[in-house]
Image (cartoon, rainbow, N blue to C red):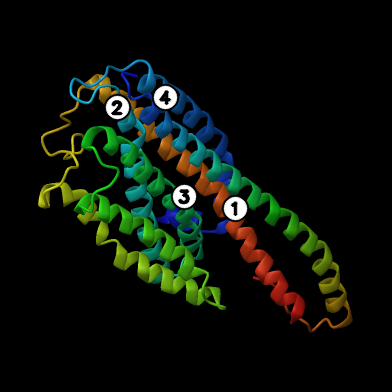
Amino acid sequence: MNWFHWLANPARFMRFAARLQPWIMALGLLTGAAGFYFALFASPADYQQGETVRIMYVHVPSAWMAMFIYVVMAAAAGSFLIWKHPLADVAAQAAAPVGAGFTLMALITGSLWGQPMWGTWWVWDARLTSVLILFFLYLGYIALVNAFDDPERGSKAGAILLLVGVVNIPIIKFSVDWWNTLHQPASVARMDGPSIDPSMLLPLLLMAAAFKLYFLYLLIVRMRGELMARRIRLLHLSDVS
Amino acid sequence: MGGYATYVWSSYGVVVVMLAVMLISSVIGGRTRDRELTALEERVGPRRQRRQQNDPEDTRHDA
């Protein structure tokens, strides 16, 4: 916990993050290149879904990121409301557009997978609808934090929205078990272990790791930008006072 | 791609474009703010120094 307190200082955190950044980029490029190679060329076609299974290697990691980033933001919102850590609010606001981006990626690639396999681009079932709601939660959060003249009030309102919206995450995860759906059930995060063949699990996990590292890299870039934006606001205020 | 090339390549295309858009917008946003901040500090910094020289009691400062 002390280490977290030490790191909660914005200037110290940014210095620490800047040192990590090149390593994150190198590791991300490496896992990303390997992931794309295995996903597109060095993995087998599925016996039922044929070559369309390759869409899974970008669709599933995007959907995992959509949920992961939301949970990270909700945790940040919690620590912002409880401990008033400004850096937590900076992190949530910096992560939001990236989360929305990954959610949109999951929706579009899912649609492109649905058309050849289900014969439809979209169905209003629980899984697809709850992910669409997640996308709107991201957009709602971004709109809400920017809707107040006082940024502090925007941050608080946004944090509350994030915490309320977190109820959607288990609904997304378990929607395929609770309701009838065209969507296939979980095949990796299962109580009895992954049911997916290792030749398909490898590219999936490589892409998932690459997407996580990509998010981490973008988060650092965006947090630095957000901290600068706040300093600009402060200087403008002190300039007119 | 077994007759599904359009769907598979479109998916990868969307992903690559979206990842690139997120990176480019983040980097450009950061650079714009960096330039704005540097210009603002050059403008506001000396003025604040003058203010404090004229009025040593002036303790206004930014956090």
Residue A56 circle label = none
Question: Can you identify the residue that label 1 sits on?
Answer: A224
Residue A220 spot, x, y in % from top left? 54, 47
Check if mark 3 and mark 1 are on a common chain. Answer: yes
- Marked residue nearer the N-terminal end (4 or 2): 4
Q: Is tag 3's residue or tag 2's residue first in the polypeptide sequence?
A: 2
Circles 3 and 2 in contact, beta carbons < 8 Å? no
Mark 4 to mark 2 CA distance (whole Å): 15 Å
Q: Quadrant of residue A138?
A: bottom left
User: CA separation, marks 3 and 2?
Assistant: 26 Å
Which numbered dot is residue A98?
3
**Residue in the picture at 37% in, 20% down:** A38
Which amino acid type corresponds to the residue marked 4 in the rendered image?
Phe
Q: Which residue is mark 2?
A: A52
Residue type, numbered disc 2: Thr
Circle nearer the viewer, 2 or 1: 2
Q: Amino acid at mark 3?
A: Val
Callout 2 and callout 1 share a chain? yes
Label 2 lies in what chain? Answer: A
Which residue does the image show at 80% across and 60% down from the upper left?
B39
Q: Find numbered disc 3 in the image and state the secondary structure of the residue it sits on.
A: helix
Q: CA distance from mark 3 to mark 4?
A: 20 Å
Q: Give the mark, 2 or 1, whose residue is nearer the N terminus.
A: 2
Disc 2 is placed on an element classified as helix
